[in-house]
Image: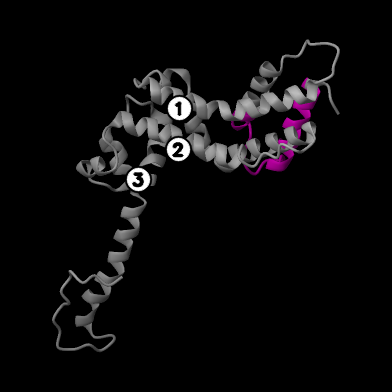
Amino acid sequence: MKNSNVKPLQTNSAKVGDATAAPIASAQRVRPKRTRRKSGMREELLKAAVELFGSRGYEAVSLRDITAEVGLKPPAFYNHFKSKDELLVSAVLAALDMFNSEVVDNDEADMPPVERMNALIRRHVLYQIANAAFAKANDRLIDSAMLERIGSPGAKQEIRSHMRRYLDVLTQIVRDILAGRSDNALEPRICALAIGTMCDNVLMWYRPGGSDSPEKVARRMSELARNMLKVD
């Protein structure tokens, strides 16, 4: 990318292959890379925050750790976030948005309830497996102890609202599946919590390259959910 603020190097030869032309070519290669990196730096910081906070804990991670992870000088951090606490809130929301966009936003409310549940479980399981390291870190990031670090009531409420999206959808699906039954032994919210936890924890035992493919694991989770709800 041409930059009008950079004066061209003076040379007596413009021939391709001439050694004096090499610094110009090098500068032209480096400059676009720097521009691309700057434009995506906020996203890189958010991803690093999720992974580092989730794996080490909030207190154990310094801003220097985070900036080093993305190759940024510590003072430049404040061009993107006001504080470490603000980064935590933004990282949690970004991770939840990523999950919801892949798993919840693709829900089709007009599907038959059992098929709808199967589809939701499949998306959840496949998301966990495809984004294993990120998903593990995020699951630890949104536990109750970590959320207690967030001092702003408004931020806490926003995070809880994002967290409830999946659970609210799944609860309604379970409620629709159980509709019309004479017994009320199964509580939709409790069942939804159990199913969601089961899908979240698939990474505790799933091993890539094993005998069970991600699709097979998703089918098994759906089967367990249907057995819980006593449906075929």
Residues marked 2 and 3 touching at CB (< 8 Å): no
Q: What distance separates the C-alpha of mark 1 from that of mark 3?
A: 20 Å
Q: What amino acid is labelled 1 in the image?
A: Glu
Asked whether, in this view, residue 177 is left or right of residue 30, the answer is right
Asked whether, in this view, residue 227 is left or right of residue 51, the answer is right
Magenta-drawn stretch contains 21 = no
Q: Secondary structure at mark 1?
A: helix
Report the residue at 28% width, 65% height from top: 31
Q: What amino acid is labelled 3 in the image?
A: Arg
Q: Secondary structure at mark 2?
A: helix
Q: Secondary structure at mark 3?
A: helix
Report the residue at 26% width, 41% height from top: 77
Magenta-drawn stretch contains 203 = yes
Question: Label 1, on which residue?
Answer: 158
Residue 148 position (above or below residue 61): above
* Mark in front: 1 vs 2: 1
Q: Which mark is residue 42?
A: 3
| Badge 3: residue crowd in 10 Å (few <14, some 14–19, many ≥20) | some
Asked whether, in this view, residue 142 is left or right of residue 30, the answer is right
Q: What's the magenta region?
A: 199-228
